Structures are given as structure tokens and as C-alpha cells.
Image (tube, rainbow, N blue to C red):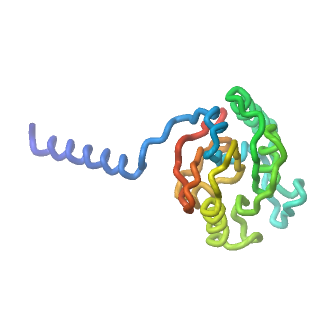
Amino acid sequence: MGQAMRGFFFCLLLACTLLAARSGPAVAADFDLSKLKDGGYVVLLRHVKAGGADSDDFDLKDCQTQRQVGAPGRAQAAVLAERFRAAGIAAATVLSSQFCRAKQTAALLGLGPVIEEPALNYFHWKLGGEDEMNAAVRGLFAAMASPDGPRVLVTHSHAFVALGQEKPPSGGGLVLRPNGTASPDVVGTIAAPE
């Protein structure tokens, strides 16, 4: 084997090693939602597809000034709701961002009353600085006790980034295990419906 070929294989091995180290520990492709009944887990879900745009002077109490869940998003939410039902999860503690697209997603899951949680809000200058909002998401998890039963949090892409995770597509998410820190353990994923 020539010097150039050995160099090529060395670079390939190095690139694969760096990629594996960067991606962190392997996580189950799609979490078995029936395990939520055991308690101890939190589903962090990105809202389903939403159309339109937030107006510059949006009002959290006026959905007409915000992006909203349309037909594609409702179809995604129906698939997610069926996944929960099929796993035997008929009710959960549901917390949501105060933005309409997140509250609409949370309601469409059909898991119970939706509790607004400002720490899950999307970053916007009207609501505070980015650092402040990222700290609010991390603080929410740092203060979170291990839940006794199913808990679902509906949020936006920035919350995943604030926790040091990649943002999932709309309707996707992670299953986390609170551990008393701002970095909950990632134990699985929720695949976004097509």
C-alpha cells in the first residue's frame, strides 16, 4: 500500500473518530412511549408544522398575530396523538410555550389541560434577551423533579439548542430524564411525523 493510500485511510479513520466523538453517546432511535407510565421521563416536543409568520407586534394572547398550526401540522399532531394512545398514554401533565402554535400542538395531543410555561417560549427580543431565555429553559430542567407519570413539554427549536441538543424537525423531540441539573439525560427520541 502506497504512502498516499495510507494517508487517505488515516484521514478517513480520524474523520470517523471525530464525528463519533462529536455526536455523543448513542440514543435510541424512537423511544417506547409506554415507558412514560413508569414516571421519571419528560418528553420535550417541538411544535408541529405551522404556517404564516409572527407579526412584528405579535401578542401572545392573539393567535391572529402569530404563526398557527395548519392542516399539515394537524396531521402531524394526529399521528403523535395516536402514538401516545397506542402506548397506553391517555393523560399527561402538559406544559406549553405561550405561543399559539405550541399551545395548539399541545391541545391537539389530547392528553389533558395545557399549562402555559413561559420558560418554554420561543426566543424573541420582545420577551427578553436570548441569554435570559436560554437560562430560563435550563433553569426549568434544573429545578424539575423526576415526574411520577407522563409529562410532555411543547416548545420551539431554541429550547433544544439551549440544552445543548440538536433541534429536531417540527413535531419531533427528545425523551429526557431530569437529574437535578440544567443538562437532563437524553434517553430517546420522538421521530417527527412526515
Apparent side of residue 180 relative to residue 37 in the rendered image (left or right): left
Which residue is outermost to the left?
Answer: 2
Determine whether 135 is above or below 153 in the image. below
Corner quadrant of residue 105: top right
In this rendering, would 190 be left or right of 22?
right
Q: Quadrant of the C terminus?
A: top right
* Residue visible at 84% across and 63% down in the picture: 58
- 163 displayed left or right of 153: left
Q: Residue at x 75, y 47 (%)?
A: 93
Q: Position of residue 184 (x, y in %)?
A: 55, 55
Q: Position of residue 32 (x, y in %)?
A: 59, 32
| Depth check, front residue: 109 or 54 | 109
* Image coords of residue 54 (percent x, y): 79, 58
State the residue at coordinates (78%, 54%): 53
> What residue do we see at 64% from left, 47% from top?
42
Q: Which quadrant is home to the N terminus?
A: top left
* Residue 21 image point, x, y percent: 36, 51
Which residue occupies the foreground of this view, 193 or 41? 41
State the residue in front, 174 or 129. 174
